[in-house]
Image: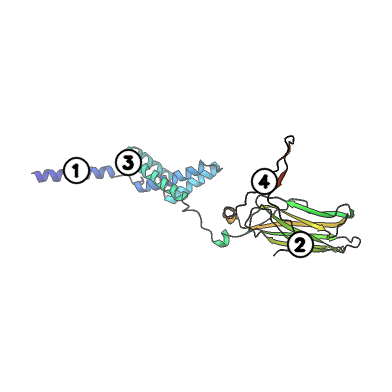
């Protein structure tokens, strides 16, 4: 008799569980509901970000989401109604959804979904024209100056840069001076200056001059400078025509941060103040360190 009672109670429990878990055919299973709700919240998170998406585009995204899961909007609505009638079950579903979203957030922050680019793309150099001055100018033969120079400061300049500086120039004959020179310099924050130079003939022939210069020192770069034309013999006048000025900086964007972190530390330049008489208000300042002068010699 006892065995029959236990057997009858067991059958009732099984039937009750089956009845409670028996969902309509058009209702998503719990796992399907978790998966769909996870993707739905991801999509709506994108919509709530700063990305501007039109209402028509949102409709297309929702349609693609339903297609991905192989369901219709009506089927999702029916499932939503079904599970909201079972609060405890729905709460467990959303607990799993929140867990999925947190795990995904952790993976994204860890860079799991960041595309790994091959070195051929990641380390591809970029070349930009950093010249920001006039690209052409001229001085007639009687111009009252003995050289034409330029200086360019740019906070983005960095070690390992390659500078391609080019221009066309015609140097006009001037008395007994048969030639001059043109030079290009890199100025470093520690006071060092590297330079290259070309000879310039004063024969009225239009020539193209090119410099290719790599910033080899592991020091912050202060500026670039140069002289389009100057005479080794002091003269009061020059005559030149310059055009097609270009200054390209070639560098690898992906390496810029690491290069900045590895720059050599520049020693502190100490200064001493001379003793002055009580009545003096302006002290005389002497710098302990000196800056090396550009010898205008070609350095390799």
Q: In which quarter of the image is residue 198?
A: bottom right
* Mark 4 surroundings within 10 Å by alpha-carbon count, few (fewer than 14), some (14 through 19), many (20 or more): few
Q: Nearer the viewer, residue 194 or 94?
A: 194
Between discs 2 and 4, the one toward the N terminus = 2
Viewer-nearest of discs 3 and 2: 2
Which is more foreground, mark 1 or mark 4? Answer: 4
- 54 w.r.t. 143: above or below: above
**Who is closer to the viewer here, 299 or 291?**
291
Task: Rate crowding at label 2 as few (under 14), some (14 to 19) or many (20 or more) other CA atoms within 10 Å.
Answer: many
Report the Cα–Cα distance between label 3 and label 2: 81 Å
Quarter holding the C terminus is bottom right
Q: Earlier in the sequence, mark 1 or mark 2?
A: 1
Q: Nearer the viewer, mark 3 or mark 4?
A: 4
- In the picture, the disc for residue 89 is 3
| Residue holding disc 1 | 12
Tags 1 and 2 touching, CB below 8 Å: no
Mark 2 or mark 4, which is nearer to you?
4
Q: Is label 2 in a helix, a strand or a loop?
A: strand
Residue 42 shows in the view: yes
Tell me how far mark 1 sits from mark 3, CA to CA. 22 Å
99 w.r.t. 231: above or below: above
Q: Could one spot residue 29 in this view of the protein?
A: no
Q: In this rendering, is residue 171 above or below 7?
A: below
Element carrying mark 1: helix
């Amino acid at each position: 008799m006892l065995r029959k009672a236990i057997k009858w109670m067991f059958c009732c429990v099984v039937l009750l569980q089956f009845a409670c878990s028996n969902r309509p055919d058009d209702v998503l299973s719990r796992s399907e509901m978790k998966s769909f709700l996870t993707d739905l919240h991801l999509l709506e998170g994108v919509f709530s970000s700063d990305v501007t998406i039109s209402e028509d585009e949102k409709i297309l995204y929702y349609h693609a989401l339903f297609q991905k899961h192989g369901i219709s909007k009506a089927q999702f609505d029916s499932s939503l109604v079904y599970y909201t009638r079972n609060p405890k079950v729905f709460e467990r579903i959303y607990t799993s959804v929140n867990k999925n979203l947190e795990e995904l957030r952790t993976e994204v922050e860890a860079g799991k979904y960041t595309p790994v680019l091959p070195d051929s793309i990641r380390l591809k150099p970029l070349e930009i024209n950093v010249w920001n001055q006039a690209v052409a100018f001229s001085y007639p033969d009687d111009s009252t100056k003995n050289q034409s120079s330029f200086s360019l400061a740019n906070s983005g300049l960095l070690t390992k840069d390659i500078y391609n500086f080019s221009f066309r120039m015609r140097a006009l004959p001037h008395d007994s001076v048969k030639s001059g020179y043109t030079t290009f310099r890199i100025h470093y924050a520690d006071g060092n200056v590297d330079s290259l130079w070309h000879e310039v003939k004063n024969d009225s022939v239009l020539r193209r001059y090119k410099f290719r210069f790599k910033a080899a020192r592991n020091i912050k770069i202060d500026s670039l400078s140069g002289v389009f034309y100057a005479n080794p013999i002091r003269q009061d006048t020059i005559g030149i025509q310059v055009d097609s000025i270009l200054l390209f900086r070639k560098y690898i964007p992906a390496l810029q941060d690491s290069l900045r972190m590895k720059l050599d530390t520049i020693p502190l330049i100490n200064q001493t103040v001379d003793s002055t008489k009580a009545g003096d208000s302006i002290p005389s300042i002497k710098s302990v360190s000196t800056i090396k002068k550009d010898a205008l010699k070609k350095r390799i």
